[in-house]
Amino acid sequence: MSLADRLAKAQQKDRISDTRVRVQERLVESLGPRLFDSALSDTELEGLVHQKLRELLDEEETPLSAQEKLLIVRQIGDSVLGLGPLEPFVRDPEVTEIMVNGWETIYVERAGKLYWSGVKFHDEGQLRRTIDKIVGKVGRRIDESSPYVDARLPDGSRVNAIIPPLAIDGPALTIRKFATDPYQANDLVQFGTLTSPVAKFLEACVRGRINILVSGGTGAGKTTTLNVLSSFIPDDERIVTIEDAAELKLQQPHVVRLEFRPPNIEGRGEVSIRDLVRNALRMRPDRIVVGEVRGGEALDMLQAMNTGHDGSISTLHSNSPRDALSRLETVVMMAGMELGNRAVREQIASAIQLIVHQQRLKDGTRRFTHVTEITGMEGEVVTMQDIFLFDFSAGVDEEGKFRGRLKATGLRPTFLDHIEEKGIYVDPELFAPEKRGVA
């Protein structure tokens, strides 16, 4: 591109930017309170804004092509009706996470990899207004007295916002998106997250009422896996889900969804996950699904699993199945009960039969790396055996993608008889180790 072309492009960009700012100011002056009229539906408000924008652009003296006018209408529409420069990423199904480090720095995640977006807000004020708009939609507030918020958008996406003085360099915003249509087991098999034999085994475990803990790091895909496992629960069972921010999308007809409530501005009114777990036990659940255990509710969950509420599922942050047990032991201690280490470990060993561990690998993919059975206690130690393991020894290909996949270790779960007693057949071939030289 020649210097003249670059100058012409820069001048066009400045002309569009100046016109956009001018027209947006006139739009706000013209419509005023109607932009916030709750009597108008989203569709009606969108039609009103776009009609007014076209009228204002026709009145502009600056010469604009039809394409430039369309661009300005979309940009102002995104700013007034949506989330400004974030709106295209919110609409993009390939973007799974949006990270705003400041009004000039926006990153997005695609296929497990982070990319600089190349766009920015006009100024810090626009970013702050966008944050206020997001948290306002879910009935929350963010200000100096409550400078951070963790909330859920109507579409299920999780939002975290934090502002000064806690955020030193200005407001920061993180949006974790979720698929409109929840992934099914076949989708995860196609993605390479797990294999077909593992999917069949896990379906048998859920239908056979095995207590399962899904472990993994942040962004490893635990909530997606929890959704998939929950989809195996029979339709004739009553399910109670308990979450910090409601993200699960269960398809069964008999589901009661409970969600944590944070304290209000005076620090009162909090309803903790532990309170909800205790309440759920009085709701006659066939299954309890806890989005994530991170505190004293772990003890109540273990006691529920040990007193007839088998077939429950939950998630936990950890780096390995063994680490999951250590962390579970730690969070149980947060319940404030005077319990010895051995007593806690016995509770864990008798309550949980299976740990599904997954990781987000360096190539950006999310994979199951362990499917591990808890077999009991030996002395002071909880004993485990790996049923399926990810084959890291297969290395990576020329594109840096891991070649390996989950493979059977040859060990059969000790709870197979328990599953078969419920009339569910599990093919022994699922656990047969692959012969050398066979892909």
Image (cartoon, rainbow, N blue to C red):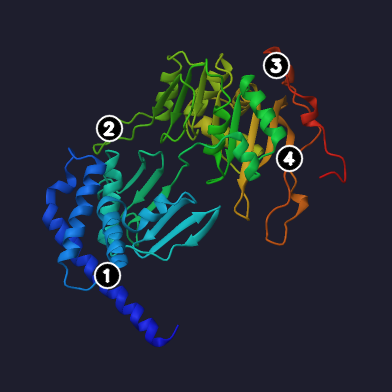
Mark 1 or mark 3, earlier in chain: 1
Q: Earlier in the sequence, mark 2 or mark 3?
A: 2
User: Seen from this angle, which residue lies furthest front?
Assistant: 66
Q: State which tag comes first along the sequence, 4 or 1.
A: 1
On screen, residue 227 above or below 179: above
Q: Which residue is mark 4?
A: 389
Amino acid type shown at disc 3: His
What residue is drawn where x is 72% and y is 44%?
405
Q: Which mark is residue 425?
A: none
Q: CA distance from mark 4 to mark 1?
A: 55 Å
Separation of residues labelled 2 and 3 (CA atoms)? 45 Å
Q: Which of the two labelled residues, at mark 2 and mark 1, occupies the earlier sequence position? A: 1
Distance from the alpha carbon under mark 4 to that under mark 3:
23 Å
Q: Which residue is mark 3?
A: 418
Q: For the C terminus, give its image quadrant.
A: top right
Rendered position, 162 above or below 136:
below
